[in-house]
């Protein structure tokens, strides 16, 4: 094709150069017009030849691509035939004995280990009737694990450090001390997903009377229980051994309704004189929960407890209470702002030998505001009747909590208490709580 292009170009050049010699000597204008016509004709021929050349080149490229594709297919077929021949010539594998299997469980060991948490609670205390001192108040080892899809275990072992109690309300010269030692705080197993929407717990546990009695002391919003619970059940709350049944009720009057019934040995040195199953103690709680809005929530509970105040079971001690909690968490700002208002009203009736029954009332109300990611300020009001003797007391407890991180919390708390019989007591404490593990500050 290159030869054809060269011949056409040479013919065009010869024609242009030889034009004046053909047919005599025409006029200049005629020669110019004839030359222009021949040039245009040659240009059209040249364009046609160029297009033909391009078409031939395209055909050559397509032919070349087709030849390469055919070569690849031939090579692939050759390899396939070689593989088939190799497979046909290979002997069948010998039989392998698989009757004995050796399995190592080392890779499963982390999944079998329980979740372990450690909590420490340190106090610096002082006041009108309290010696200023630093106390290693409480340490706790928390062990939890799901045993299978249906059961869960929880064991809490605690250590109580030595220290002096407040002398307020005690006879002159009498001082009480914290007794140092280890003890079982909780130890129980829970069966989940029992038919009928039930959950069954068996063992020693903090009982579900109100909201706060169930919480571990280091997880409270203040450093101590509200006085109405401490007066009724002691500074550590109501803890006993027995069986607890939780029923997640159908959605009736609230978004969530739950009923808890517990039967225990009544081993509480303040409210009951149990310790065995001759005269058990009964506790019940009906809880209702509402989502008021995107940012606010309300929980209301009705609580009751019945037991005996003497080992012979002749003197009944009954408790009735209502509690409510309002929480406000602004949507999208819950890490920076939070408000909580919680209160309880309690009535108790104690039978006494040869005397009229002792009716006592008590209540607690506190509010707290989270005004930054790390700071919470709050104030608690308590008003309590003495459970066994005439008299009552009330007080205010302001506090300021700083969450250094989820592992370390610092708190400053003061207390003003006015007692009808013993006068006024002022005290303060500085609390440092540190924790490690997956269940650092369980509040249930």
Image (tube, grey):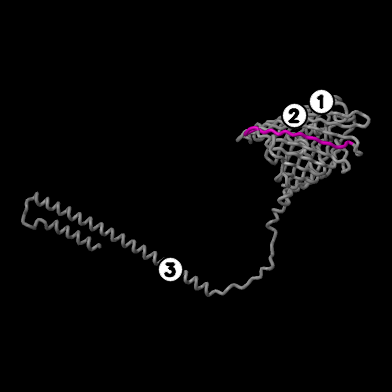
239, 118: nearer the viewer: 239
Residue 264: image location, x then y, percent? 83, 42
Which sits in the foreground, 134 or 281? 281
Is residue 441 depicted above or below 105 in this figure?
above
Q: CA distance from mark 1 to mark 2?
A: 17 Å
User: Magenta region's main secondary structure?
Assistant: strand
- Which of the 4 quarters of the picture holds residue 443? top right
Instruction: Where is residue 4? Give x, y as percent.
Output: 22, 62
- Disc number for residue 271: none
Residue 202 in sight from this viewpoint: yes
The stretch in magenta equals 292-309
Left or right side of 293 for 324: right
> How would you rate the neighbour count of disc 3 (Cα within 10 Å): few for under 14, some for 14-19, many for 20 or more?
few
Q: Is residue 142 left or right of residue 268?
A: left
Q: Disc 1 designates what residue?
A: 418
* Residue at (77, 45) in percent of width and height: 201
Residue sitting at x 47%, y 71%: 81
Q: Percent x, y for residue 391?
A: 86, 26
Image x and y of residue 28, in percent: 8, 50
- Label located before the other in sequence (3 or 1): 3
Q: Earlier in the sequence, mark 2 or mark 3?
A: 3
Q: Which residue is mark 3?
A: 75
Residue assigned mark 2: 365
- State the SS at label 2: strand
| Apparent side of residue 97 relative to residue 421 in the rendered image (left or right) | left
Which quadrant of the figure contains the C terminus?
A: top right
Q: Is 324 placed left or right of 357 in the picture?
A: left
């Amino acid at each position: 094709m290159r030869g054809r292009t060269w011949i056409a170009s040479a013919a065009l050049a010869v024609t242009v150069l030889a034009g004046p010699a053909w047919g005599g000597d025409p006029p200049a204008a005629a020669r110019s017009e004839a030359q222009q016509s021949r040039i245009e004709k040659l240009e059209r021929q040249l364009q046609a030849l160029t297009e033909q050349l391009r078409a031939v080149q395209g055909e050559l490229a397509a032919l070349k691509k087709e030849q390469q594709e055919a070569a690849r297919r031939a090579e692939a077929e050759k390899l396939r035939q070689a593989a088939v021949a190799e497979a046909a010539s290979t002997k069948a594998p010998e039989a392998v004995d698989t009757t004995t299997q050796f399995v190592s469980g080392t890779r499963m060991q982390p999944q079998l280990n329980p979740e372990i948490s450690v909590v420490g609670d340190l106090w610096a205390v002082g006041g009108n009737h309290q010696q200023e001192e630093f106390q290693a108040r409480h340490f706790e080892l928390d062990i939890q694990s799901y045993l299978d899809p249906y059961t869960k275990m929880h064991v809490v072992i605690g250590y109580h450090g030595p220290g002096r109690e407040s002398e307020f309300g005690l006879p002159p010269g009498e001082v009480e001390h914290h007794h140092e030692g280890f003890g079982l705080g909780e130890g129980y197993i829970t069966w989940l997903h029992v038919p009928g929407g039930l959950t069954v717990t068996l063992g020693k546990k903090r009982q579900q009377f109100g909201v706060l009695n169930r919480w571990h002391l280091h997880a409270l919003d203040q450093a101590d229980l509200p006085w109405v619970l401490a007066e009724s059940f002691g500074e550590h709350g109501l803890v006993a051994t027995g069986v607890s049944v939780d029923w997640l009720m159908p959605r009736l009057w609230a978004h969530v309704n739950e009923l808890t019934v517990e039967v225990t040995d009544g081993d509480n040195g303040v409210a009951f004189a149990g310790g065995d199953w001759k005269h058990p103690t009964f506790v019940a709680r009906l809880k209702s929960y509402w989502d008021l809005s995107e940012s606010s929530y309300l929980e209301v509970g009705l609580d009751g407890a019945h037991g005996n105040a003497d080992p012979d079971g002749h003197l009944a001690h009954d408790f009735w209470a209502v509690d409510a909690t309002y929480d406000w968490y602004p949507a999208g700002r819950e890490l920076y702002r939070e408000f909580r208002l919680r209160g309880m009203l309690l009535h108790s009736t104690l039978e006494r030998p040869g005397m009229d029954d002792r009716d006592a009332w008590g209540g607690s109300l506190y509010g707290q505001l989270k005004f930054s990611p790390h700071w919470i300020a709050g104030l608690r009001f308590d008003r309590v009747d003495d459970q066994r003797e005439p008299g009552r007391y009330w007080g205010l407890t302001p506090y300021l909590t700083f969450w250094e991180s989820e592992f370390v919390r610092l708190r400053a708390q003061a207390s003003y208490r006015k007692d009808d019989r013993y006068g006024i007591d002022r005290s303060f404490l500085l609390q440092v709580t540190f924790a490690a593990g997956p269940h650092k500050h369980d509040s249930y």
